[in-house]
Image (tube, grey):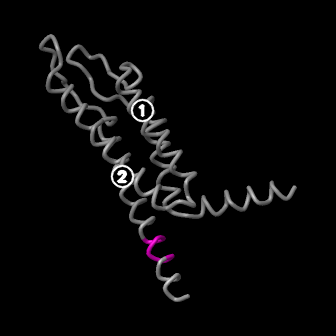
């Protein structure tokens, strides 16, 4: 019973932090919305989703899993900050893969319409930057309290 209460209190402390909410949103967006929104539409009218290409789905799921792992590292703010930076770089790579694939599609097939799924990495980057800003504020607050002691 005592362990359950401790776990509930730790979970409550973790969720009350705004950076955990930002990272949870990143996980939900990168892990869930990729199945709903198309990345782009070919000239033939075929919509391409992330689940249609193993590279896209792998990169999106890796970003979502990294965000979830980072949420549970709420006691180690420095590692959380570094992993968020890595996730930002990861999303920039994903964005670069999108641009590269759209500009160099084989068979002279041009992308006729870009879908809303293309901006998912951009939204993730913005949320991760906000999470890092909140982590930095927490770290600065802890340092200032330590100086007072």
- In this rendering, the answer to whether 14 lies above or below 46 is below
Q: Quadrant of residue 62?
A: top left
Q: Which residue has dot 2 on it?
A: 85
SS of the residue under disc 1: helix
Name which residue lies at 48% across and 51% down: 23
Q: Quadrant of residue 41?
A: top left
In-front residue for pair 42/28: 28
Q: Position of residue 108 (x, y in %)?
A: 12, 14
Q: Which residue has dot 1 on it?
A: 34
Name which residue lies at 76% across and 60% down: 6
The reply, left or right, for residue 29 in relation to residue 99 is right
> Which mark is in front, 1 or 2?
2
Please tell me whether residue 138 belongs to the stretch shown in magenta: yes
Q: Position of residue 50 (x, y in %)?
A: 38, 26
Q: Position of residue 91 (x, y in %)?
A: 33, 42
Q: Going by the picture, which residue comes out furthest to the left? A: 108
In-front residue for pair 82/96: 82
- Circle 1 crowding by C-alpha within 10 Å: few under 14, some 14–19, many from 20: many
Find the distance from the CA under tag 1 to the CA under tag 2: 22 Å
What secondary structure is the magenta-colored segment mainly?
A: helix
Please tell me whether residue 71 belongs to the stretch shown in magenta: no
The reply, left or right, for residue 54 in relation to residue 79 is left
- Marked residue nearer the N-terminal end (1 or 2): 1
Q: Which residues are magenta?
A: 137-142
**Image quadrant in which the C terminus is located:** bottom right
- In this rendering, the answer to whether 22 lies above or below 41 is below
Name which residue lies at 43% across and 72% down: 137
Q: Position of residue 36 (x, y in %)?
A: 44, 31
**Image quadrant in which the N terminus is located:** bottom right
- Circle 2 crowding by C-alpha within 10 Å: few under 14, some 14–19, many from 20: some
Q: Going by the picture, which residue comes out furthest to the right? A: 1
């Amino acid at each position: 019973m005592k362990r359950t209460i401790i776990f509930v209190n730790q979970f409550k402390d973790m969720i009350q932090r705004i950076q955990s909410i930002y990272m949870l949103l990143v996980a939900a967006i990168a892990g869930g919305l990729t199945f709903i929104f198309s990345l782009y539409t070919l000239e033939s009218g075929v919509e391409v989703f992330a689940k249609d290409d193993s590279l896209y789905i792998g990169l999106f799921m890796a970003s979502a899993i990294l965000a979830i792992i980072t949420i549970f590292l709420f006691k180690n703010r420095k590692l959380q900050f570094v992993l968020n930076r890595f996730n930002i770089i990861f999303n920039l790579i994903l964005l670069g893969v999108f641009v590269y694939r759209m500009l160099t599609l084989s068979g002279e097939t041009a992308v006729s319409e870009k879908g809303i799924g293309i901006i998912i990495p951009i939204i993730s980057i913005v949320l991760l930057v906000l999470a890092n800003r909140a982590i930095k504020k927490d770290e600065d607050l802890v340092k200032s309290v330590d100086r007072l002691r």
